[in-house]
Amino acid sequence: MFITLEGPEGSGKTSHIQPLSRWLAARGLNVYVTREPGGTAIGEQIRHVIHDLKNTEMHPRTEALLYQAARAQIVEQVLRPRLAAGEIVLCDRYFDSTLAYQGYGHQIIGLDELRQVIRFATGGLTPDLTVLLDLDVEVGLARKGRQDEWNRLDAFTVDFHQRVRAGYHELLKLEPMRWVLLDAAQPWESVQECLRKVISERLG
Ligand code: TMP
């Protein structure tokens, strides 16, 4: 089963994924955690290029293609083999981030064009379940500023991040069977409990 976590900056995806994985593993399930961009040696190098604050001249098309390059690698090297072996794969972001950030965020590249490059990168590999950890953009950026590495995309305007968040809601409406919406403003423990419940239900 392929599960992805999505959401605007600072929504807590990264803080939830390891505890979630330990909880699943304690139930005897074979779980693998990874992230995008990254998750492979090549993908981590690409991540560095995309997120480097010095790369201010990067065009959204370049950005979109670099994310797909990292994605093609993780799909072939990690995701497909592990899913084929029957593992549960938890991935911190996947192609919905491209639609939300490079599509709705920049508003330069059409969603159909993006879907084509995503299709090329993934060969159509789609999550079974995608959880949107939803949070007010300014609260999320303030949280992230306090805790994590500040990257080139974080430095985009608040308006950009508002469009990303609204974009996620649009994506959720398009595929309500794949997506689950969680309010990430709740206390951390409540969010973790909701995640466990949602995944248990899907696993049956
Ligand atoms: P994060 O791991 O701290 O969430 O950083 C990843 C950043 O990359 C975040 O700003 C979202 C962005 N991103 C995209 O814009 N498009 C993508 O396809 C992916 C995977 C991430």
Image (spheres, helix red, strand yellow):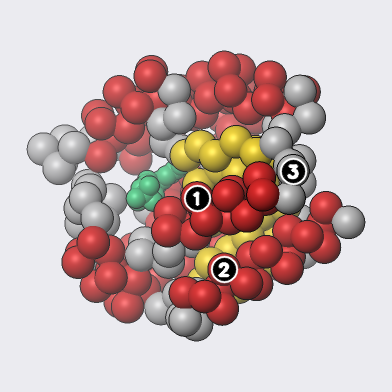
Residue furthest left as drawn: 54
Q: Quadrant of residue 8?
A: bottom left
Residue 36 appears in the rendering = yes
Q: Residues within 10 Å of mark 3 (few under 14, many from 20)?
A: few
Residue 40: x and y in percent read 44, 23
Query: Quick one: label 1, few (<14), some, or many (20+) residues within 10 Å?
Result: some
Label 3 sits on what residue type? Answer: Gly
- 93 or 90: nearer the eye? 90
Q: Amino acid at mark 1?
A: Gln
Which residue corresponds to the image point at 51% horizontal and 37% vertical from the top-left? 34
Q: Secondary structure at mark 1?
A: helix
Number of the label disc, if any, that sits on residue 18: 1
Measuring from the top left, give residue 93's x and y in whole percent. Answer: 51, 47
Res 142 quadrant in image: bottom left
Dot in front, 3 or 1: 3
Q: Which mark is residue 154?
A: none
SS of the residue under disc 2:
helix
**Residue on which the image places disc 3:** 28
Please give the residue where the numbered disc 2 appears in the rendered image: 192
